[in-house]
Image: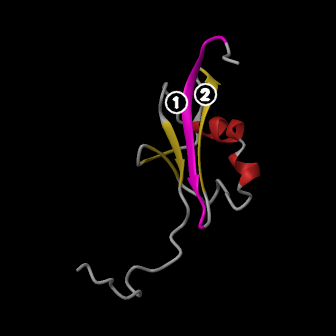
């Protein structure tokens, strides 16, 4: 059910094993942090720690306090788990 003065946004996260992208209705003036909490992603993926995981909108880092606009996609990023300087380069042929 659509709330009065609401907007539709997306929230995305990918763990090692699964991906989730939800479209949800939130009130206008909702922040990134509030949208993540409303989305249920923190319950679905308990490994998410917003003190550690960075967040962004369409590939650009933002703070949890940033106010969202309609149709934006909040992305929750996992920390890099491999040092790119120590792993072998893959053949690109």
Of all residues, the one furthest to the top in this rendering is 4
The x and y percentages for residue 42 are 72, 50
Mark 2 packing: few (<14 Cα in 10 Å), some, or many (20+)?
some
Residue at disc 2, secondary structure: loop
Is 56 located above or below residue 9 in the figure?
A: below
The residue that disc 1 covers is 68
Q: Is residue 12 a member of the stretch shown in magenta?
A: yes
Q: Quick one: label 2 or label 1, which is nearer the N terminus?
A: 2
Which residue appears at 54% of the width and 66% of the height?
79
Image: magenta residue range: 4-16
What's the coloring here? secondary structure
Of all residues, the one furthest to the front in this rendering is 93
The residue that disc 2 covers is 30
The x and y percentages for residue 58 are 42, 43
Q: In the figure, is residue 68 to the left or right of 24?
A: left
Which residue appears at 68% of the width and 15% of the height?
3
Mark 1 packing: few (<14 Cα in 10 Å), some, or many (20+)?
many
Distance of label 2 from label 1 (alpha carbons): 6 Å
The x and y percentages for residue 45 are 71, 56
Cβ–Cβ under 8 Å for marks 2 and 1: yes
Q: In the figure, is residue 40 to the left or right of 90?
A: right
């Amino acid at each position: 059910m659509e709330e009065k003065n609401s907007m539709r946004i997306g929230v995305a996260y990918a763990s090692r094993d699964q991906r989730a992208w939800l479209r949800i209705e939130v009130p206008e003036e909702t922040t990134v942090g509030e949208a993540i909490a409303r989305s249920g992603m923190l319950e679905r993926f308990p490994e998410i720690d917003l003190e550690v995981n960075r967040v962004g909108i369409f590939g650009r880092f933002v703070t949890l306090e940033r106010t969202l606009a309609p149709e934006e996609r909040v992305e929750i990023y996992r920390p890099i788990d491999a040092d790119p300087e120590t792993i072998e380069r893959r053949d690109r042929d």
